[in-house]
Image (tube, rainbow, N blue to C red):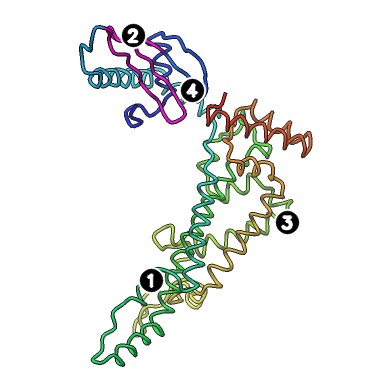
Amino acid sequence: MDRKLLPVPGVVQLVMRLGVEAHNLGKAEKLAWEYPFKFRSYSCAVALQKFGMYLYIAPLEDGEADPLEGVAREIFGKLSAAGRCIERRLLAKVAKEEVQAGRVAIHNQAGRLRAMYEFFRRLANRAYGGEGLLMEDVKNAPASGSTPEAEELARQLKMTFGGPIARDSEGFYATIAMINAYFSLLEHLLVLALPATDFDPKSESITNFIGSKILEKYDRVFDVKLDPVAKKFRVRLQGAAEVWRNPYGHGAFDKGHGTLYFQVPGIGALPAILSDIRTHPTFHFTPGRESAFEESCALFDEIDGWLRSGPVRHGVMWAEAGLGVSYDSLSLDRFRSAVSDGEDAFMRYLESASYAEEQAANMDW
């Protein structure tokens, strides 16, 4: 069945239960559910299996009255129309109420976000090592000269003057992508680690928390007034954000007006931040490896180590196990009860949850 036409299997299941009143045959190996039904004279079934949702149509015993492809398209159309009807008249209202009440689960994308961060980090490291795409362009650029000796001299000049610029430029490009990716990962982890705090879905809104800025999330998860380590990392994160992340994430503009200039008659344009321009990325033709890449990697490695051992380590362990996070009161109580029972009890709870999620994903019942 086309995922674009019927993207949510659960809606199809509701159609079969509420609209068709079909009976679920239950789970089986690599099968989550299956509903047999009749369409005209055809015996059919719709099933959710490991690799997708399938429609089965048995040919008629006395020969096919219609091409089965046409019958399938007609069934798809009716399922899609019925699904949209259920979504508009029932599920949209329920979804809004559940979200407002905080009875939601979040799909864990920490693994994908960390993979993005590590990918750009590798690109930056390779670029600074002279193995980037721009360095390849410089090496492969045709050298112009009247003689082989002149061409070789031109080639050496390109490597001498163009090589460092290409190397540092690509390293910086990849570094900015790496920094943005890490901040995205960190913001995601702060949301997933919320159950490890005293967050109360009855008095706080998970959607408001998700919509808040990253440092606001940080301040809700960590007590920066009482935790000196959390305060130290907050200061360093804010500095990295203001220097590297925010300007290049918002059109190359920053709160300090580092990209603004004003005119002085008889002198010309001066930077609005005056001599403080020396600390701004635009002051350098290409910021050095140490100032952007090395310092950022060191900061991110330290934060990762602290997250995995600090006050919300259980939430981070849960997130890095790839598990989804539910914010309803019952789920939060189970999580916190496992934490309060000690490390061994929490690890058993984590392993049990991981096994159950893996079993459901693989449909190994």
Verify CB contact (< 8 Å) between mark 4 and mark 1: no
The nearer-to-camera label among 4 and 3 is 4
The nearer-to-camera label among 3 and 2 is 2
Find residue 323 and report its horizontal and vertical position in percent. 59, 37
User: Residues under labels 3 and 2: Cα distance?
Assistant: 67 Å
User: Residues under labels 1 and 3: Cα distance?
Assistant: 43 Å
User: Residues under labels 4 and 3: Cα distance?
Assistant: 51 Å
Which amino acid is tagged 1? Leu
In the image, residue 305 sits, relative to residue 351, either above or below, namely: below
- Name the secondary structure under disc 1: helix
Residue 9 in which image quadrant: top left
Find residue 33 and report its horizontal and vertical position in percent. 47, 19
Task: List the residue tagged with mark 4.
Answer: 31
Task: List the residue tagged with mark 2.
Answer: 38
Which amino acid is tagged 4? Leu
What's drawn in magenta, residue-wise?
A: 36-61
Residue 153 in which image quadrant: bottom left
Which amino acid is tagged 2? Lys
Ranked by sequence position, the earlier of labels 1 and 3 is 1
In the image, residue 146 sits, relative to residue 22, either above or below, namely: below
Q: Compare residues 336 and 128 and report the one nearer the observer.
A: 128
Task: List the residue tagged with mark 1.
Answer: 134
Q: Circle 2: is it few (<14), some (14-19), or many (20+) Cα within 10 Å?
A: few
Ranked by sequence position, the earlier of labels 4 and 2 is 4
- Does the segment drawn in magenta span residue 109? no
Find residue 334 and report its horizontal and vertical position in percent. 69, 29
